[in-house]
Image (cartoon, rainbow, N blue to C red):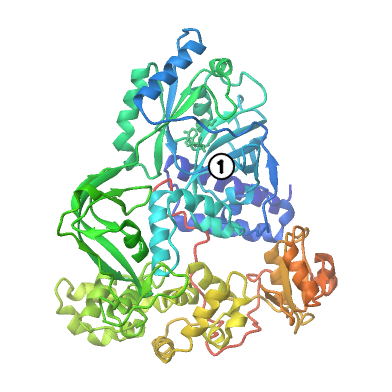
Amino acid sequence: MTDIQQQITTLTERLHYLNHQYYQRDLSEIPDQEFDQMLADLARLEKEYPQFAHPNSPTQRVGGTITKQFPTAEHRFPMLSLGNTYSEADLREFDERVRRGLEGAEVAYVCELKFDGVAMSLTYQDGQLTQGVTRGDGTRGDVVTSNVRTIKNLPLHLRPTPNQPSDFEVRGEIFMPLPVFADLNAEREANGEQLLANPRNAASGALKLQDSALVAARRLRFYAYSFLTAGRGTFPTHSASLEALQAWGLPVSDTWRRCHSLQDVLDFVHEWDKKRFTLPVATDGIVVKVDDFQQQEILGFTAKSPRWAIAYKYPAEAARTRLREIRYQVGRTGAVTPVALLDPVPLAGTVVKRASVHNANQIAALDLRLGDMVFVEKGGEIIPKITGVDGSARPADSEPIKYPTACPACGTPLIRPEGEAHFRCPNDRGCPPQRKARLEHFVSRKAMNIDGLGAETVGRFFDLGLVTDAASLYALPAKAAELAQLDRMGEKSVQRLLTGLEESKQVPFDRVLFGLGIRYVGETVAEKLAAHYRSMEAISAATATELAAVPEVGGVIAESLAAWFQEDDNLALVSGLRAAGVQLALTGEAPQAVSDRLAGLTFVLSGVFEQHSREDLQQLIQQHGGKVTGSISKKLSYLVAGDKMGPAKREKATELKVPIISEADLMAMLPTETNAPVAAEEESTSTTLPSEDFSPETSLPAKPVTGQGQQGSLF
Ligand code: IVH
């Protein structure tokens, strides 16, 4: 083994071990930063020496491959569903059926929680994860292996043990942990994006994403609940198989229990009725399984489901209470959201006082009136919603709800853009809650993350007129004495805040861009824009059409950006930030220019390529002076077609007479010795995009590659 190969293997094994300790055993053996450094080292070595990279390397968890669509695969064992029951009487009948089928033999059950996510079939061969397939139609599903590899609590390779078959399948549920769901929706709301309906949709939507780096950002998790193999007799019981899966390193929720009687099963059902709401995963019932595999075989299957298992579904958690008032909140992007204030009522483990009503349509559809008795439900969502009105209890003096026509905060007439469900206050410059929310967003953790200046403090400063916009924050040092006089502030807090402000001037450009709160410009889009244009200047100079051609930036985002840079106030804000010394350009090395062989040419990359990843091809094109865009137009020089390119792209290119070339044709256009992408980290600081903000001397604080997170093993 060469030194490098040895180094890669050692790092791979050590990182696998640390991941296992962290995600399965809740043990953090080394600081996150050190972990991220090791991961970055491994990524660098793998890039330089791809021949030594392990296919299941821990670096695969950060994602990065873009495929165009998913191939499908046939399930070795069909993926069936479970019969549902909703009452204890149904469970009793199930127990009787099982006992009849087993001619009165002793029977033990395993009770598990029914996780509300997406079913997944994983194949492990010689201890390595080789395939992840969705349920699909039960016979065939989508092969989503690269997406599944990003799930951090899912082992890419297993701890070897003598009883581990060389080829087996594990089934389980992929889900989005509730805190992650809440986080993601809060972010989407702040960006004026459509909210995700519930954690299950969020998980299944994430698995369908084409770019696994985006999947990684969704922080999905996995719980195993079945073991399947072609041979018989590996384990006598389902419970023994669960224990083995756990021992091999697969995550099995420790909520399951072996039950020896129907009464034990019913006790389990009752116990988890409320307790399930303390779990970080959405659950909608209990699954009861006959434990003994031989007994399972005797009982067999119906056409759709096993006779040896059943799902007990808890009734949807609903409560009835009175609607007192509707408040209208104005968000950062001006969207007006009605919030119902209710008489407090206990529901699914919490006391509910507020519920969402979504929008004006919903109010009309429910014929909601103030004073009505309403039903509220928690359907996996964090904020409960009003699902109905008890018409029989409508008081005579109930009042129809008059949806405001003017902004409740600034009085500007509301508008409702076509196709949108929300009314919006268009006064983005003057409307106080919008301005305040923008400031809160600017200082938030994922944007400038200013130590000593949280949402509450900045809101207070805004109310007191001490700050008006993001740039004005940097004038706070001049007001230090005034700040120290404020309640709950004091010298120390002021000092901390001022240090935090100073440090925020080193926050990388992509996060500054995200912090501006431009509609639809979330974290990922900001990163892509920053990487593509490298400076605020270059972005502001781009037209909507140019912006829309950047991969991941569609027409809607491009229009929103271009419109933002048209506003004088926004340009003034940017100048203010520039004057304050905030990073308005990337300061790291730009991709290194290697030749100008492709200068003046633009390319669209489509489909899956054989020799290089799409990112590598993009980098290669850029390093040789070419441009990569996302859409096919007359001006495009070449469409580079990979495997599985959609027919629409081919048609459009043919129609516009854009030449379609292969990956090999593209490589042939490059100088022969240099046609491997040169890693940006290697050397040199030359850039093809000069800008007044570009300062190659300043080095960036390393951005964590993965961020193991601080929140406990599931996250
Ligand atoms: S066992 C033959 N166990 O519920 C099916 N399923 O209709 C055996 N689910 O979509 C499935 N938690 O993904 C089983 N602890 C659990 C489960 C579980 C959730 C899902 C499963 C499927 C549905 C069954």
Residue 32 on image: x %, y %: 45, 55
Q: Toward the viewer: 447 or 75? A: 75
Q: Quadrant of residue 302?
A: top right
Q: Toward the viewer: 50 or 541? A: 541
- State the residue at coordinates (43%, 46%): 714
Q: Toward the viewer: 339 or 494? A: 339
- Can residue 678 be seen in the rendering of this structure? no
Q: Toward the viewer: 186 or 421? A: 421
Relative placement, left or right, of 185 versus 627 is left
Instruction: Determine crowd level at label 1: few under 14, some 14-19, many 20+ residues with C-alpha closer than 10 A.
Output: many
Instruction: Examine the rendered structure and indicate whether residue 643 appears above or below residue 586.
Output: above
Q: Is ligand 1 less than 8 Å from the beta carbon at label 1?
A: no
Q: Quadrant of residue 340?
A: bottom left
Residue 206 on image: x %, y %: 53, 54
Q: Secondary structure at mark 1?
A: loop
Residue 300 on image: x %, y %: 58, 20
Q: From the image, tell me which residue sits under label 1.
A: 155
Relative placement, left or right, of 411 versus 543 is left
Q: Amino acid at mark 1?
A: Pro
Instruction: Examine the rendered structure and indicate whether residue 613 appears above or below residue 199.
Output: below
Instruction: Examine the rendered structure and indicate whether residue 473 appears above or below residue 631.
Output: below
For the view shown, which residue lies furthest in the top direction?
Answer: 104
Marker count (numbered): 1
- State the residue at coordinates (44%, 47%): 29
Residue 108 on image: x %, y %: 44, 17
- Can residue 51 be seen in the rendering of this structure? yes
Instruction: Examine the rendered structure and indicate whether residue 112 appears above or below residue 601.
Output: above
